[in-house]
Amino acid sequence: MNVDKLMLQLEQKHPGEVEYLQAVREVLESIEDIYNQNPQFEAAGIIERIVEPDRILTFKIPWVDDSGKVNVNLGYRVQFNNAIGPYKGGLRFHPSVNLSGLKFLGFEQIFKNSLTTLPMGGGKGGSDFNPKGKSDAEVMRFCQAFMMELWRLIGPETDVPAGDIGVGGREIGFLYGMYRKLARENTGVLTGKGGTWGGSLVRPEATGFGNVYFAKEMLATKGETFEGKTVAISGFGNVAWGAALKATELGAKVVTMSGPDGYIYDPEGISGEKIDYMLELRASNNDIVKPYSYKFESGQFYEGKKPWEQKVDIALPCAIQNELNKEDAEMLVKNGCICVSEGANMPCTPEAIEVIQSNKLLYGPGKAANAGGVATSGLEMSQNSMKLSWSREEVDEKLHSIMCNIHEACVKYGKGTDGHVDYVKGANIAGFLKVANAMLDQGVI
Ligand code: NDP
Ligand code: 2IT
């Protein structure tokens, strides 16, 4: 394999798909050596097959808002690779959603799901619909219209969507209701479901918990822990919330969280009733970061800025792709940060990763560090298949052990001769090998 040549061909085939091309390049650069040492991969055209999705469904979603106006959004499902299990991955509802973004997320999901040790393929979907500021009734009508198209493509053994940005418990409920009506079956076709209708305990906080478990393992390789550390978190959605809870539980102080409009710095820590207040604001569908500074005196709002300018020991980017750039990374390094662990998908730009890695910080890439969410989705699928539910402790223990296994796999494939672990390389190689070997076993299809 020649990475530059392959990337040139892909750029010509998919011009302008910046995020997708960024994600593919990172994986190809990591696996180049191991791929070239195993000629059976080249002979079976594994790379050419793995970088293209199996299929993409695009559809229009007409829906009527509360004023009676007809709106039309675009919907997508990218079924990327199902060599090791049914397509699995979230749905994102956000105005920025386009095909390049979903192809990047679907591609990452293949390797992330492979790392979880569970049998799940990779997929992703979503819409450019913006749930922010919409009434519950509008969100319901939109979700129903979305599912009217999607339902024929998915199924508990075929493709199992879940949440992502803009898709939480409320949206999964509306989507599931419509699927159940159209398919006339009550099966585990979505994950992140409510506790009384097939959902798993711990799924809402699992991505954030998993990220902290992964960071904890990375810190342990340096004899460090969360105890007494300061932590910067970005976003305040599903992932950030879980990460804030777990980091606080492990003795750290979370001092930031953010939204697209700026961030809050609270040197006294964001925990307890402050987190409860944020959750209330979130449930009201409004901007949630600025009001925090009115409610709590210790919290200061920095308009238009990002949390990475604060002095912290650990950074957990949990909002959106490419939210931490080279200058942000340089600031973190300058301020003595020792660990960056990605709750979001691809939040660090390639230039930021270069800065973080060349300064030998601990760096957990999203496909490893945030795999706890989809892993717990996999556990929800297992419970649905068995028609049983596990206790909170059982699920959390399984999640914890999966994150430790992922960390071990990264160390196995990413440890250099100097003892330093390149978690990007480790995650990409471990995730890739399992899928590539399954594709070899199953022939050219
Ligand atoms: P949510 O919609 O629950 O939260 C997203 C958060 O990010 C919100 O607080 C949002 O603020 C904030 N945000 C959005 N855009 C920006 C921006 N440009 N700058 C700063 N903050 C921003 O999504 P999730 O928590 O589910 O997802 C967050 C990230 O984690 C995504 O990258 C997602 O792909 C990834 N992820 C999610 C998993 C899951 O299980 N949910 C699993 C693995 C990864 P506001 O609401 O004000 O717009
Ligand atoms: O990016 C992700 O891993 C998710 N949004 C979760 C996917 C899932 O199927 O639980």
Image: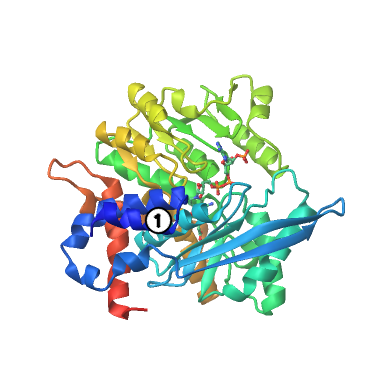
Going 62% across and 76% down the picture, which residue do you hit?
Answer: 152
Quadrant location of the N terminus? bottom left
- Compared to residue 32, the image places residue 132 above or below, namely above
Q: For mark 1, give the secondary structure.
A: helix
332 vs 146, nearest the viewer: 146
Relative image position of residue 7 (x, y in whole percent): 33, 54
296 vs 16, nearest the viewer: 16
On screen, residue 377 versus residue 400, left or right, reads: right
Location of residue 119 (image quadrant): bottom left
Label 1 neighbourhood size at 10 Å, few (<14), some (14-19), many (20+)?
few
Relative image position of residue 80 (x, y in whole percent): 45, 66
On screen, residue 188 versus residue 132, left or right, reads: left
The amino acid pointed to by label 1 is Gln
Relative image position of residue 400 (x, y in whole percent): 39, 53
Location of residue 122 (image quadrant): bottom left
- Compared to residue 369, the image places residue 199 above or below, namely below
Residue furthest to the right in view is: 68
Relative image position of residue 256 (x, y in whole percent): 52, 29
Going 30% across and 51% down the picture, which residue do you hit?
Answer: 407
- Colour mode? rainbow
Residue carrying label 1? 12
Going 63% across and 72% down the picture, which residue do you hit?
Answer: 151
